[in-house]
Amino acid sequence: MRNSIRVSLGIAALCVAVSAMAQQPVVYPAKGQSAKQQGKDDSACHTWAKQNTGIDPAVLAQTPPPQKTGPAVGGGERVGGALMGAAGGALIGGIAGDTGKGAAIGAVVGTMGGGRKARQSQQAQNQQAQAQRQQQMDTFYRAYGACMEGRGYTIK
């Protein structure tokens, strides 16, 4: 239970950090550009970065990465766990004199273990999707920043 809480807190912290990192960089006029000129340059560089990277941050913001959850999602971890648990339980139950009861207990325990494995797999997939999304945003903002720097702005 404690590990689940730690994992949940870690994922929450990661999401907060990722959303903070995905923000557009701050642009300062370094050569006395007017606000009007900065707006034009911002628009031009946004378009340029979008064309050159193939990434549109507006589209990424509107389509969150898929979050796989629930017991229906998985690669058969529960079934595999149940089968392995039943086999192990039957073996132990056979030694103790009650194969059926041992198999049933083993199946329940195996299903629970398989469910845990499925949740861990889902979390890993969700984290990978979030990391890929972050990488796309970083790529876009590097291109945008390079364009703005080329037009005489300081990027932070």
Image (tube, rainbow, N blue to C red):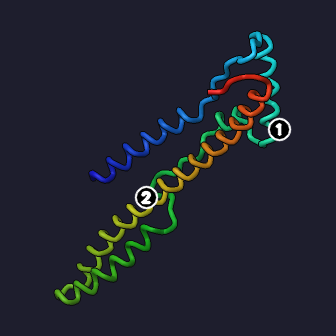
The crowd level at tag 1 (other Cα within 10 Å; few <14, some 14-19, many 20+) is few
**Marks 2 & 1, CB-CB < 8 Å contact:** no
Residue closer to the observer: 97 or 78:
78
* Residue that carries the numbered disc 2 in the rendered image: 120
Q: What residue type is labelled 2?
A: Gln
Q: Residue at x 74, y 34 (%)?
A: 146
Q: Residue 105, how many percent across, how many down? A: 26, 73
Helix, strand or loop at mark 2: helix
In terms of image quadrants, where is residue 41? top right
* Residue that carries the numbered disc 1 in the rendered image: 51
Tell whether 50 sits left or right of 83: right
Q: Upstream in the sequence, badge 2 or badge 1?
A: 1
Depicted 115 relative to depicted 18: above or below = below
Helix, strand or loop at mark 1: helix
Q: Residue 31, how many percent across, how many down? A: 75, 16
Q: Residue 153, how many percent across, how many down? A: 72, 22
In the rendered image, the quadrant that contains the C terminus is: top right
Q: Residue at x 74, y 40 (%)?
A: 55
How much space separates mark 2 and mark 1, taking CA atoms? Answer: 37 Å
In terms of image quadrants, where is residue 101? bottom left
Q: Which amino acid does label 1 sit on?
A: Gln
Depicted 98 relative to depicted 4: above or below = below
Depicted 73 relative to depicted 63: above or below = below
